Amino acid sequence: MTDTSVLFERNSTFSDGFDQADLPILPKLNTLIVACIDARVDPAHVLGLGLGDAVVVRNNGGRVTRAVIEEIAVLAAMVSKMTQNPHPAFNVVLMQHTQCGAQNFANPEFQDMIRTKLGIDVTPSAITDQATDLKTDIARLRDAGEIPGTLTVSAVLYDVKTGSVREVAEPRQLGDLRANV
């Protein structure tokens, strides 16, 4: 049996008796989570999410990159249109984790190797200190004018050894963060 056939077998189990065809497009918890692609850090398991509870965006390091900013801005525009509310409000939770492979991206030699071999700059995804990097990512969202100030942002750190999540930054509305700059 191949790894892919295991996935199809698991989907068959999932789809047997599937009864959630009427889930709304917008997440039930009014939340978008930005997390790392690391297989040990699945927000559905870590945070106990059910199908349809939250939108999850995953990338190297769970960092706020230009692409993540664009995804959040587009989602906000979609929510605004769907709800007929020009000031959409939902939660953005930034989630990084201990022992992250993106810590390698902070190494200048590694950065140079990736840039030389692939032409990719990994510095925006580099992890140096999770608490500091999460606060930097909150500032990136704060400074992204295309994201409405009505969104709330917070940050957590997941410990891969204990399974626990620690709050690094409490929920704050982007508009409030912008007013305090």
Image (cartoon, rainbow, N blue to C red):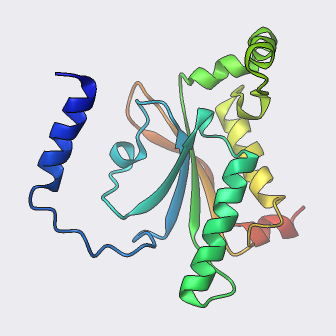
Is 73 on the left or on the right of 17, as rendered? right
Residue 123 found in image quarter? top right
Q: Residue furthest right?
A: 181
174, above or below 98, in the image:
below
| In the depicted structure, whether residue 122 falls above or below residue 151 | above
Give x and y (percent) for residue 56: 49, 53
Quarter of the image where one finds residue 171: bottom right
Task: Give the residue drawn at x 39%, y 71%.
Answer: 28
In the depicted structure, whether residue 116 falls above or below residue 36: above
Q: Residue at x 64, y 58 (%)?
A: 71
Please determine whether, in this image, residue 46 is positioned above or below residue 50: above
In depth, the one of 18 and 138 nearer the eye is 18
Residue 157 visible in the picture: yes
Q: Residue at x 36, y 48 (%)?
A: 44
List x then y, in percent, for residue 72: 65, 61
Residue 172 shows in the view = no
- In the picture, the quarter occupied by the C terminus is bottom right
Rendered residue at 44%/61% (across/down): 54
**Residue 151, percent from left and from top:** 66, 70
User: In the depicted view, which residue is nearer to us: 176 or 19?
Assistant: 19
Q: Could you tell me which quadrant the N terminus lies in?
A: top left
